[in-house]
Image: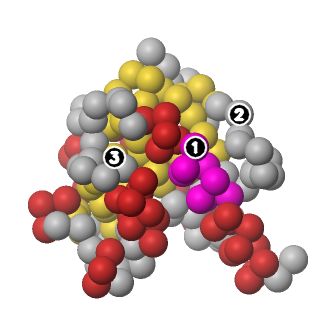
Amino acid sequence: MSRLESFIRRMTAQRIVLDAVCAEVTDMQGPILELGLGNGRTYDHLRERLPGRRIIAFDRALAAHPSSVPPESDLVIGEIRETAARFAGIRAALVHADIGTGIEELDLKTQQWLPGLAVSLLQSGGIAVSGLPLDHAGLQPLPLCDGVPAGRYFIYRKAV
């Protein structure tokens, strides 16, 4: 499969999953955390699906399209592992992490710290969505949505 085709499949899976979990967290209190703002497409989608919700975005550097830049108070720039850790206990309803690189060695390093970070950010019953698997005793895997191939995207609920 070409990298373009793989990207399209990943973005399609991401949209399907985010639409489903946004419906689930609509009535749940707590902020939404976007780990990896990138060019802001997902942030913009979350903002549209969850109007009026506080969405805090984290990234190493600001590279988002100007129309998809969060307010200064909800934009955290720096190493995500360090900056997001300062928000431990925030009791997020949803943590979305699309910070995989597609480079196995780098992604394996991220998978060492990302699951614990997600647990520290979520409220009990909160949802984590990730492009990388999050192996942690505090996260219960949830079934994927129809149309999302296994291993393409991952959904978890923080244990109550």
Q: Of 158 and 136, which appears nearest the observer?
A: 158
Q: Earlier in the sequence, mark 1 or mark 3?
A: 1
- Point out residue 140 in the picture as x, y percentages from the top left corner: 59, 26
| Above or below: residue 89 compared with residue 102 | above
Q: Looking at the image, is mark 3 or mark 2 earlier in the sequence?
A: 3
The vertical placement of 71 against 27, above or below, is: below
Residue type marked 3:
Ile
Residues in magenta, as a range? 13-20
* Residue matched to label 3: 32
Label 1 to label 3: alpha-carbon separation: 14 Å
Residue 58, image quadrant? bottom left
The residue singled out by tag 1 in the image is 20
Residue, x 47% and y 44% (percent of image)? 22
The percent coordinates of residue 16 (x first, y second) are: 64, 53
Q: CA distance from mark 3 to mark 2?
A: 21 Å
Q: Helix, strand, or loop for circle 3?
A: strand
What residue is pinned by disc 2?
143
